[in-house]
Image (cartoon, rainbow, N blue to C red):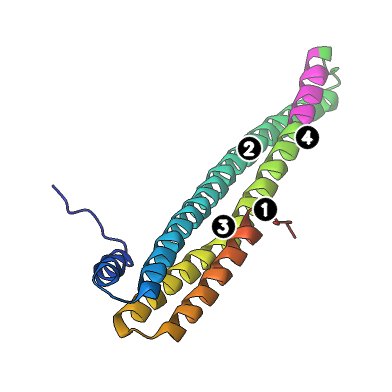
Amino acid sequence: MPEEMESPTEQAQEDMHHHATHSAEKWVGWVALTAAFLAALAAVTGLKAGDHANEALFEQVQASDKWNEFQAQKSKTLATLNKNEILVAMGKTVTEADKSKLEEREKKQEELTVEARELQHSSGEHMRRHQKLAPGVTMFQIAIAMAAITVLSKRKPIWFVSLAFGLLGVYFLVQGTVLFHPA
């Protein structure tokens, strides 16, 4: 059975918990609590970023499928147009059925174009959200690491640096979710 992958901050959190429970200084417990909260935010941000990346890829594949279908319709339309030109050159008339098929195919091409462009736009929006969220995960991980350094070194000022990175993580989380406005 394969070993489960350990989060890069998991060991740091375990060390902090150990030091927090064995420390006489109360603030160390608050640092550990802060780190746990930051880890939860990192997990949420990471899940949201991954979800948006997956949706972007999925919708881009769907858009590609629509463009492929458009090309197939375009080929059929061109074949029908060529057939009609040959018929006219031979002095024959184009049937109403062929005219109707041509109109249907052209209408289908327009619909496919609209659908493909909508999917591409939505894919781009998901990717932009992912790009807003991804740095947040990094900021939260740095904040957790700084909290671990705080506990291990017993240097309280480093905790404030950890909190600053945590706030940056929150900024990116909010930018990627609540306040996101596509370009």
Q: Are marks 3 and 2 in contact (CB under 8 Å)?
A: no
Question: Is residue 170 depicted above or below 69 in this figure?
Answer: below
Q: Is mark 4 on a helix, strand or loop?
A: helix
Q: Which of 149 and 182 is in front in this view?
A: 149
Which mark is nearer the camera, 4 or 1? 1
- State which quarter of the image contains the C terminus: bottom right
Q: Give the range drawn in magenta.
A: 97-108
Q: Is mark 1 on a helix, strand or loop?
A: loop
Q: What percent of the width, then of the height, locates residue 174?
A: 63, 59
Please identify the dominant SS of the magenta region.
Answer: helix
Label located before the other in sequence (3 or 2): 2
What residue sits right under mark 1 in the picture? 178
Q: Residues within 10 Å of mark 1 (few under 14, many from 20)?
A: few
Q: What percent of the width, then of the height, locates residue 121?
A: 70, 48
Residue type of the residue flagged with mark 1: Val
Which mark is nearer the camera, 2 or 1? 1
Q: Are marks 3 and 1 in contact (CB under 8 Å)?
A: no
Q: Is mark 2 on a helix, strand or loop?
A: helix
Using the numbered discs, state the Cα–Cα distance from disc 3 to disc 2 in whole angstroms: 24 Å
In the image, which disc is placed on residue 130? Answer: 3
